[in-house]
Image (cartoon, rainbow, N blue to C red):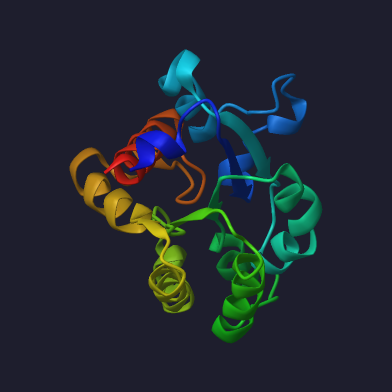
Amino acid sequence: MSSDLLSPRRTVVFAGDSVTDCGRRADPEGLGDGYVRDLFDDLGAGRPRIVNAGISGNRAVDLRARWQTDVLAHEPDLVSVLIGINDTWRRYDEDDPTSTEDFEAAYRACLEPVRARLVLVEPFLLAVKDEQRSWREDLDPKIEVVRRLAREYDAILVPADVEFTRQAAVVGATTLADDGVHPTSAGHRLLADLWRRTVSA
């Protein structure tokens, strides 16, 4: 299936927060140095047009606000979304929570106008600090929202939280995300491989 979705005739837009952004606005090619860059390199000369539309710090509501200009305007054939960790994080570092209901409403508002194939990536967390363990009560319901929306919109679900948790048990959490949120180069490699494997299945 997806070999056609990733063909040179296609446009793929990656939307999200800092995990996707990875310095792309300072990169002449606009790709950054994370999993989007890894995928660009992996796919080689026969790759689709790849657009990185990640912005560090974004929550679902921020993504919704710029959806038309930063995502739909590119007339994508495939849209990959990775959002949600900041919707949880801001509750704990700035006392600025996003309810599960508001998260779902903003996420759904992004998906509704899309006529392209959708790839939804689970937000993920590796608890490298003791206080991050409590974040799960906020994040897990949001991950369930992403899974439910993937079913509802017939999207490809990339099980990033599942895979990061599984791999962290083998190699250690800080190997994959030294602050529990932002992937290291090894974490981005894991995410790129998982994304490609899932989308190409």
- Residue that sits furthest to the top in the current view: 45
Residue 116, image x, y percentages: 56, 54
Quadrant that contains the C terminus: top left
**Where in the figure is residue 3, as x and y percent of width and height?**
36, 34
Residue 17 or residue 52, whichever sits in front: 52
Residue at image point 64% right, 82% down: 102
Frontmost residue, 173 versus 13: 13
**Vertical placement of residue 166 versus 112, above or below:** above
Question: Which residue occupies 71% across, 52% down?
Answer: 72
Total numbered labels placed on residues in the image: 0
Q: Residue at x 74, y 58 (%)?
A: 67
The residue at the far left in this view is 170
Q: Is residue 166 left or right of residue 132?
A: left
Tell me the quadrant of the picture where the N terminus can be found.
Answer: top left
Please tell me whether residue 121 is drawn above or below residue 89 in the rendered image: above
* Residue toward you, 84 or 65: 65
Among the 4 quarters of the image, the one containing residue 126: bottom left
